Image (cartoon, rainbow, N blue to C red):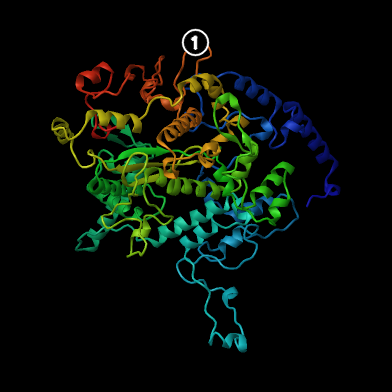
Amino acid sequence: MVIDGHRSERMRQARQALLERVKKRYPSLGKPEDEEGVVPDAVMKKILETSEKIPKPGKSLLPDKHATPAEGAKPLEEVFSGMRPQSLIAERTSDAGVDVAGHRIETFRQYTPLQVNLDANYIKQFNSLYPSQVFPFTFPYMVGGPEYFSRSSDRRRDVSFDISGEYYQQFDLTAMPQCAIVPSRLWTAGIARRIEAQIQADWCAIPALRNLDFRHAMYASPSLRHQARVETADALAAESRDLCDAAMNLYQHHLWHGYQVSRTGRKQYINGDITKLRFAHGLTAVEKKLLQNMGFITRTLAGAQELRLQMGHCLTGANIVYGTGVFITISPSERHSGLTLRLLRKRANDPWLKYGEPDFKTLMQKLAAADYPSLETPTREWADANDCDYAEIGLPEYKLRRQAVSNDILCCVEAFLVLVKVVLATLLGIRMCPKCPHCNANDSKNPCQDLFGSNMDTFGGIFGACDGFGGAVESQRGGTLHIHLIAYIISAFQHSTLARISEMIEEKLLSVAALEKYMEWVNRNEHLDAALHNKNVEDMEKQWRQTYKHKSNDALGYVPTFVFNDKSATMWSGADLPTAFDDAAAYMKLYNSSGQFVLSRTNHHIHLKDSKTGERVPLNACIAKRQKKKKVKECKHGFPMTKQRTRKTKLVCPGVARHHHLKVCFQLYSMLT
């Protein structure tokens, strides 16, 4: 506590002189730009000048990808609207080892004669009540919680009831059962699916609980072990020193300064990538043993990099059983998804819905209902300028959609699972339930696989008959989920070598014309409606920078009208052949125009024009690392593929490959792409 009456006049004059010197050196002191969180005018002016200049290709910090572009430019007041955390920082800092209590006491000691006694006793993290202690506003009642290493002994659990009376006698109860024991993994997963708004809108609660569960799983797992035969205490001490030195050398030298040697003899530095540590050059036998033990243990931890190795083993085993598959990548967009908004859950009477901006509050109250927005019922025909039969649905404004989704990440996950387990499974023609693939284990009564291990539906799918698929889900830089999978299509290529395929063609068991027609359908590289695409390509590339936030692109989130309102007569309902033929032709015309509307905004490989030369330049994500210093940069995917264009499908031999600038020598996995 500071009392002005205790200060002498000399100290007042010294303080005033000090303030004058400080103001003279720092003129902005005490002004609005000196406040925390306020950007100075000079800095803001420089930022605006820089933002007006178009960055040169390869110099932008935005990880632009044509399929998943970064968020477009926004006004300053809307920059953080709809944002959500996408990065992790170190859990501990350099100040973690200081004496917190002593530091605080010294801070308050300058305000003499105030006496402050502080303590910094840490609470136990692996305690059932820990989540409610550190997140009191998210969990307002200190009850329940996960069980960690052992049953928590807390008096709040000591609840007793008088079970005498007719009500308890009808259940033949002589003692009340104990509280349910909920493991940490099950409790964390359950909390992430709770509907309370204070849980879904808290950016720190779920990541912190997952971090706590990961550390609990790590501590509960077996420790690193190294078995060695020693005869004396000195030998045991020497063996222990060797292990400690090996662990220190792995972290201090190999992980940060080590390198691995590629097949061509080039040095590839590890730079902290722990997945490359086991390939480091110059590892000793003890270091290899430690890395082997560490890899064995981390394979059982969810979220560890070693799980990728297990995924590779699973897919390799699937390739042996089901044969060679077709590689597919699917990247659903949550920005233009009516399904994502439909699966957003909130309680209608949740206090969280009563506050906030009027427009956002109204939207969240609508989304709390079970039937908004509609996924099937169109309101009116969409703009005729695109020659498309899409319906213009009353989707919320793009900014409000992003803001709503950022407050409920679970709806994005649920929408992704629906698209994979329902839509994708239907397209591929396989049986798939919400519990797949676990529905086939433990003598399940309702497995999706048949006795031969196939999930194939009777009529197949868009690629023909399919036994099943396997893949892995990962998160992109923008925070959206996508899946890489291998679909095991039933074909002659499934279990046959290329030499056998050649023999089958010579023996007339396979038709080259049929293979060409099939490949034209499966691996189509031309527009469904080229005229529609060329008509709108300039406008679409301008909107791509703004992630298609304009209202004219809202139809990306809905199914076209002619799919749900297809009431035309078919041969199944008694129509004659000419009528059915005309109906099929009309349906294909609508299908091509509607499909082109989506493909132009999702599968069009964009190379933007340079503002000075007018030539198209690859995006940052399209440029290979070895070409970023070159003046003329080429797309690493080969686009626009002018040398590979043909009028019809060709069977590629070495001569045809050289003519179209295709590789003759390549890896095995490139052979079938």
Residue 126, position as x, y percentages in the image = 50, 63
Q: Quadrant of residue 428?
A: top left
Q: Is residue 491 above or below residue 106?
A: above
Give the side of residue 529 with respect to residue 453, left or right. Answer: right
Residue 504, position as x, y percentages in the image = 16, 34
Which residue position holds label 1?
613
Q: Is residue 71 something that shows in the picture?
A: yes
Q: Is residue 560 something that shows in the picture?
A: no
How many numbered markers are drawn?
1
Q: Quadrant of residue 441?
A: bottom left
Front-lying residue, 670 or 140? 670
Q: Is residue 589 above or below residue 629?
A: below
Q: Quadrant of residue 498?
A: top left
Q: Which residue is at 44% across, 25% downward?
A: 605
Residue 502, position as x, y percentages in the image = 16, 31
Residue 289, position as x, y percentages in the image = 25, 51
Where disc 1 sits, the SS reads loop
Front-lying residue, 113 or 617? 617
Q: Which residue is at 39% across, 52% downward?
A: 432
What's the amino acid at mark 1? Thr
Give the side of residue 154 with respect to residue 589, left or right. Answer: right
Front-lying residue, 30 or 602? 602
Q: Is residue 632 above or below residue 330?
A: above
Q: Around disc 1, counting alpha carbons within 10 Å, would you say few (fewer than 14), some (14 to 19), or many (20 or more)?
A: few
